[in-house]
């Protein structure tokens, strides 16, 4: 089977996803907010969901993501919309004072859209857990 080489549009989406993962891992909510649409729908691995403001507040006050790792990602571009699928591993801890770090594996689907201002932003995200979160020593 031949290796797929991303098109220019696919590479743009992959680069934006790398920036999103870096912003999460660095706790840079300003950069993260710039990558997300104001119409965001984010469904977490536990099934709870957030919009733009509530997602940023969730990251600010509830969950500290230390690292995001993505496996092979597949991007399909449909005009001004792109669908990304692939595996994701978050290393994170709750912001409640508990020092326990957890590893959360999931399969994720994201939708990116080119908005009126010409910038691609994530408009939807849904993660399905793979197994149960495991403690990191």
Image (spheres, rainbow, N blue to C red):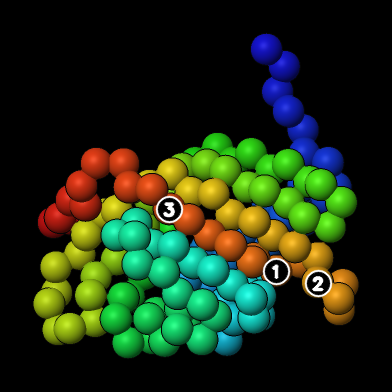
Residue in the foreground of this view, choosing between 27 and 37? 37
Q: Is residue 114 left or right of residue 31?
A: right
Label 2, on which residue? 115
Q: Is residue 21 above or below residue 70?
A: below
Residue 54 appears in view: yes
Q: Return the mark for residue 121.
A: 1
Label 3, on which residue? 127
Residue in the foreground of this view, choosing between 17 and 66? 17
Place residue 34 in its image quadrant.
bottom right
Q: Is residue 71 left or right of residue 135?
A: right
Dot 1 falls on a residue whose secondary structure is strand
Quick one: quadrant of the N terminus? top right
Q: Along the polypeptide, which appears first: circle 3 or circle 1?
A: 1
Q: Are marks 2 and 1 in contact (CB under 8 Å)?
A: yes
Q: Residues within 10 Å of mark 1 (few under 14, many from 20)?
A: many
Q: Along the polypeptide, which appears first: circle 2 or circle 3?
A: 2
Q: Along the polypeptide, which appears first: circle 2 or circle 1?
A: 2
Q: Are marks 3 and 1 in contact (CB under 8 Å)?
A: no
Q: Residues within 10 Å of mark 2 (few under 14, many from 20)?
A: some
Place residue 117 in its image quadrant.
bottom right
Query: CA gap, disc 2 to disc 1?
Result: 7 Å
Instruction: Identify the residue shown where x is 69% and y is 60%.
Output: 112
Q: Is residue 72 left or right of residue 38?
A: left
Give x and y (percent) for residue 90. Answer: 36, 57
């Amino acid at each position: 089977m031949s290796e797929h080489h991303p098109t220019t549009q696919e590479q743009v989406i992959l680069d934006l996803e790398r920036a999103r993962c870096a912003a999460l891992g660095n706790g840079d909510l300003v950069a993260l907010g710039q990558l997300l649409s104001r119409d965001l729908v984010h469904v977490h691995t536990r099934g709870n969901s957030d919009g733009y403001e509530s997602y940023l507040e969730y990251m600010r006050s509830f969950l500290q993501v230390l690292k995001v790792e993505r496996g092979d990602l597949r991007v399909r571009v449909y005009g001004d919309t792109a669908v990304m699928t692939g595996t994701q591993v978050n290393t994170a801890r709750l912001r409640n004072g508990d020092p326990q770090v957890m590893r959360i594996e999931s399969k994720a689907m994201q939708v990116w859209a080119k908005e009126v201002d010409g910038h691609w932003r994530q408009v939807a995200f849904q993660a399905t857990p793979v197994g149960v979160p495991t403690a990191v020593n």
